[in-house]
Amino acid sequence: MIKEMSNNPTKQGPKIPNTPHPQRHIIIPRRAAVLTSNLNVVKCQCQCVCGTFSLNFTLSLSLSLSLFISLFLKPTKPIHLSLSLSLSLSLSLSLSLSLSLSLAHVRLCTTSTFLNSFPLSQTLSNSLKLSQTLSNSLKLSQTLSHFFSQGNGSGRPFVMTGSNMLTLLGLTFVLSLTTTMVMATDGNPGFRVCLTNKGMDYAREVEMPILAQELQSLTIPDISGSAKSPVGHIDYDISNIKASTVNLGTSAIDSQTDGIHLDLNSATIGLTAHWHYREHSWPHVSDSGSVDISAEDISINLVLDVGMSSSHEPTISIPSCSGGVHKIDLKFHGGASWLYNLFTGLIGDTVKDALNKELCSEIQKELVETGNKLLSTLPTTVDLDDYAEINFELIQAPNTTSTYLLTSHRGAFVTKSHNTTLPPFNAAPVPYPSNVTRMFYLFIDEYLARSAGWAYQQAGYLQWVITNNDVPSGFPVQLTTASLGQLVPGLLNVCANCTMDMHLAAIEDPLAIQINASTGLDLVLTFNISTYINPPAGTNGTDKFAFALQARIFGDGTVHLYTNQDTEYIGANISFVKVDLAVVDSAVGNIDPSLLQDVMNVFCQEVIVPQLNKHITQGFPIPTVNGLTFVGPETWLHKGTTTTNTMHTNPHSPRFGTTIPCAHQIVFGDGYVRIDTDISYTPSA
């Protein structure tokens, strides 16, 4: 049985350097049109970077310059800096916001490519971050103001001289530049979700009957007033106004840059109520009865905004709701004919106004409560085992375009014990969706898979100790000096027939992945291997270090989807290709690694790779809201990221001539994994 090493093994060999991953150069054929489009995107993004830097530089320079001017006016007298810094901040804000909006306007007007690579909402979002930065700067100004007015604790005000004025100017510039540069850096997502207009339309079809049912409980506050009538001045009231029938008519939903627009038209609502009146003067004639109210030709236009909470969770709000009832009819039961006319004319408008106020309020309440309740079931963390979990929190607020809603998630494996520590490398930019025809898209960057290797290594999982007892008796080479000594003669000089131990430990960043249109998913897993000679049987000696190797295991990978208990999973499988060996250290003389090559090939193919497949085949659950399942998913692999098509084989890859596990087609593209799918949703009770 292979034993896992503890985090602090008792036997320590020489330190093996963590060599970088090998760079595998793969030629990717591309059509000229695609190359031109990509160059345009790069050009636009470079303009954006330059513009962002100039924005930050302007903020820093204006802050420092304003402060410098204020100090230069009175360089030798005690001064209080709160007013000076406030003026500096105001100047910085106006200059920076003007520059930011100007840059956004120029770029958005000059290239349509930029719209696809950097949406307007994201540009404006960066501008809005200035308010937070300036708030932090204001706190700095308050601290500096207190320092200059109170001195360094002596109670004497600070006196500005030429030397410390220059020092302060430099410090202020560095602090403000650092603040704004930090503001401008956002990590790329390792996991991205796209809900298209087609998907939203499906959600609308599911939600409208639910909304209509909820509006059945609509109640209107009681209405009362006074009016003149043929019998004199009367007081009236309409009470217990409740909805009886709801028909939401036609509805439409689509995504726009300012949010998700939902329009309801030709809706009707039937209500019942109780009416009563009483004459002011004697004999105080009174009467009561019931009334049926029919509200027709109702139109409601609202905008849903999907945002991000302070805890990086998605939220729904409705900042805009308009429209209302265009026609209302009342049918009274009981009373005289003059009363019918009175209530139909005078009271009808009052009922309409009251109903208009309640309609938007009730629809907003239902959609926001239902939406946020549903979003609360979307996991921000996926628990895997005792070692690792996956961080799926939002890293920026969702943004909308004219065709989809896009959410960007961290998508990183982290250790259970230090789940706030992220991998020491970043995800590559994930492309924005284009030509969307399905309801739902998932983008999984190779960063997520790479972070898995890092997290499990950090958790101490990718470490094993193999003893001679773990080696099958039929294996061509045993873990003894007598057996291995045939390949490494120096072992026999230490002990003619001693057992040995082999310690395997992954390097800090052990997994390198590339996905390519022609070769599919390629990976390299790097391990350090240290061997020790056990003391002869019956003696009390200590283990002796023999030699250390570094093994780079090359493999091919496949990706598959499957459903387990209404949860969608994505998994992988590795096929062994080869192993490259390098001698790192030796205490038994020179070693020819080629002599160990065949043994290590068999060992990796029969032991290491099967151990890994045992875990990665199960994969991890894809985070979705409760009740959501995939319908006819398709998986596409592109450079840097993985997509899935049900019940097909892959006609383009010789490696997948038969149906892969869970019957999903994999088409190799040029980088990352993308899952294209329609969806089905079953609301929970």
Image (spheres, helix red, strand yellow):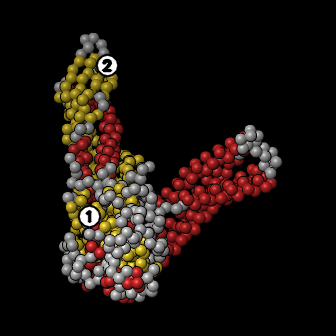
Task: Relative to 683, say whether 525 is above or below.
Answer: below
Q: Can you see residue 411?
A: no
Q: CA distance from mark 2 to mark 1?
A: 72 Å
- Judge by depth and name the residue closer to the eye, 146 or 197: 146
- Judge by depth and name the residue closer to the eye, 287 or 370: 370
Q: Amino acid at mark 1?
A: Tyr
Picture coordinates of residue 342, whole percent (x, y): 27, 28
Picture coordinates of residue 292, whole percent (x, y): 20, 34
Q: At 32% across and 50% down in the image, what residue appears?
A: 376
What kind of element bears circle 1? Answer: strand
Badge 1: how crowded within 10 Å, few (<14), some, or many (20+)? some
Task: Relative to 249, say whether 291 is above or below.
Answer: above
Q: At 21% across and 58% down in the image, what residue appears?
A: 566
The residue wearing badge 1 is: 569
Q: Amino acid at mark 2?
A: His
Q: Quadrant of residue 464?
A: bottom left
- Judge by depth and name the residue closer to the eye, 40 or 431: 431
The residue wearing badge 2 is: 233
Q: At 23% across and 34% down in the image, what residue appears?
A: 242
What kind of element bears circle 2? Answer: strand
Picture coordinates of residue 573, whole percent (x, y): 28, 73
Q: At 41% across and 63% down in the image, what residue appears?
A: 8
